Image: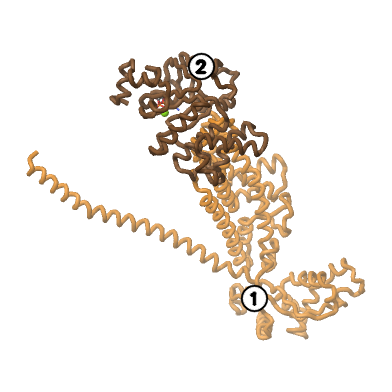
Chain colours: A orange, B brown
Amino acid sequence: MTDMARTNTAARTAQSVSARLGRRYAAERTFRLLGLGALLISLGFLVILLSSIFAKGWTGFIQTQVALEITFDTQVIDPEGSRDPAALDTADYAALVRSALSLRLAPEADRGARRELTALISTGAANQLRHMLAAEPDLMGTTHTVWLTASDKLDMVIKGQVPRQVGAEGNTLSDRQLGWVSALETGGNIRKAFNTTFFTAGDSREPEQAGIWGAVVGSFFSLAVTLLVSFPLGVATAVYLEEFAPTNRWTNLIEVNINNLAAVPSVVFGLLGLAVFLNLFHMPRSAPLVGGLVLALICLPTIIIAGRAALKAVPPSIRQAAAGLGASRLQVVVHHVLPLSMPGMLTGTILGMARALGETAPLLMIGMVAFIVDIPKGPLDPAAVLPVQVYLWAGSSERAFVEKTSAAIIVLLLFLVAMNMVAIMLRKKFERRW
Amino acid sequence: MTHFLPEGTVKIAAQNLGVFYGEKQALHAINLDIRAGEVTALIGPSGCGKSTFLRCINRMNDMVDGARVEGSLTLDGNDIYDRGIDVVQLRARVGMVFQKPNPFPKSIYDNVAYGPRIHGMAKDQTELDEIVMNSLEKAGLLGEVEDRLSESGTSLSGGQQQRLCIARAIAVSPEIILMDEPCSALDPIATAKVEELIDELRENFTIVIVTHSMQQAARVSQRTAFFHLGKVVEMGDTEQIFTNPQHTLTQGYITGRFG
Ligand SMILES: Nc1ncnc2c1ncn2[C@@H]1O[C@H](COP(=O)(O)OP(=O)(O)O)[C@@H](O)[C@H]1O
Ligand SMILES: [Mg+2]
């Protein structure tokens, strides 16, 4: 090659490179814009979802209350003066509320007016008074201002969820009732307070008395069963497959099947649970025990796969070092491999648990959709779980359940976020140290 | 050192030893004697089977799926692959130091104490402390780590980590220490320290070392075996191998014409 020719080739290369450079940069820019666009769209959806849930749900954490001058009238509560706790327990406290209402708003009310008056206050108010008196027997015969829970209809009007207009959509209050509401408001007898009932009560037909606590406890028992069953089983399976089992056709078959199980729709596991746990073993319906077992089946493949990945990530040199010192196979695993892979296993388990917490369909299959008022005391008591509670409330017709549904979703999301945070923290804390 | 034999007695003997990985034969009819109280160096080009031979001696090949051994390999006259031999016991007698330093991600103390603990070698804490201190001392590491025994073994430098691994192997009081290219991941200064250490350890242990460095083999070993394509081409006193090799292959390798 002559010098001339060489210079020519170099010039041509430079030319063709610079010609393509522009196109290359353009392609890169387009790609980056596309990526950014995709990110923004998904972020947008997330923001819309979260803000709509929070906008709808935050009022669920607040409850309207009405102040009334309650007289703990001995004539009504304990006409015989026996102070017998059983008698006090069964007394007609609703009558106290009724008379306080009519005294305050319509002293000459007829029966119809009295009924309309009572509709302003929750039927749970009687219970509130019962508890007050039980806690403080000295109240007997005295008169006190008590903040009573408003009915859901009044609650909706005060919160502005339905228009203050007779006949308007959603409003069930009459002209007369709206007038009383105004009277109460001008008298400073209406306030909005933190809704403790929502966090302490079980489900109820009355929205203002419905709470999430029963579902939280139900979810807790279910997940406890899930954890107790799936964690030891999953870890043992992962350890056996990864550290002890020979590689042959059988173990390959098992491996493929575990991976397939992880992709099986959860409703199928629900059907399995229905057939096996309920129909074959006759376990109690709606019980967290059964729910937890079904959820354990769903979690198991996830935990096994995560566990095996964590075991694989432990460098072979650690195993060799221990074996070289004369550690038995089991000692190698128990002393070195398992502790080193535990963070990875726990992370996988928490993520599996988070998935289990949100599962609904398989629990519907095993009958965990019953209406349950009592807070479950153990894994054998009938219970609801959080996502099923959301499902139940979303299907209720009362306007006031709309905000309760969103509020329950917020609680569920908070639990999920907390669990994922723990998983991330575990991962951060125990990042590879070798 | 009750097992310690007079210098020069045959400690390990391979007769017609063959090793297969599945269908592939990695070692062919190896005949080799390793003498007590000496450092035996195994040299040869990559893939010639030095590590494979080393791993036969403490049966680390058992951990490889499909590995198979034929012929005989004896330790003090007893077949290592006899069914009556317990691998755990064997490995307590034959320690190993690996190519890459591989301390456990535990404290320096726990690294050294691990072997004695699993073999129940110490009656109480003071005895265990003694073993740990002794081993660190013998590995020439005590001065450097004395005041930070609870720090992680992985926080040490590469050379220190390798000496920690040697201390860990010594702590079990083995009769033999196998070293598979122990200095290949170390810098020259750390290498010099480990070589010095190997020379001292010869007093108490029989050492078999695989190395890629001719100088290292010449410096630390009394006997050298030259491997090529899964066979022992030549075996003899180190001095003789390096000054007067009998085989042209050996000569070619040590003068650097191939490898
Ligand atoms: N675990 C194994 N599985 C299959 N073949 C192996 C394995 N280990 C080593 N070999 C093969 O055995 C031969 C000898 O390897 P090795 O003993 O590691 O050589 P060296 O240590 O001398 O470099 C090589 O051909 C290598 O490919
Ligand atoms: Mg090797």
Q: For the residues labelled 2 and 1, say whether their Cβ atoms are less than 8 Å apart.
A: no
Q: Chain of mark 1?
A: A
Residue B154: where, in percent of width, then height? 49, 43
Q: What residue would you read off at disc 1?
A: A192
Residue A390: where, in percent of width, then height? 61, 59
Q: Quadrant of residue A279?
A: top right
Ligand 1 visible in quadrant: top left
Q: In this rendering, is residue B8 above or below A394?
A: above
Residue B9 marker: 2
Q: Let me know if residue A369 appears in the view.
A: no
Q: In this rendering, is residue B104 above or below A223?
A: above
| Left or right: A388 as drawn, with respect to A260 | right
Which label sits in the foreground, 2 or 1? 2
Q: Quadrant of residue A30?
A: bottom left
| Left or right: B207 as drawn, with respect to A135 | left
Q: Element under label 2?
A: loop
Q: Nearer the viewer, residue A224 or B56?
A: B56
- Mark 2, ligand 1, within 8 Å: the answer is no
Q: Residues within 10 Å of mark 2 (few under 14, many from 20)?
A: some
Q: Nearer the viewer, residue B82 or A87?
A: B82
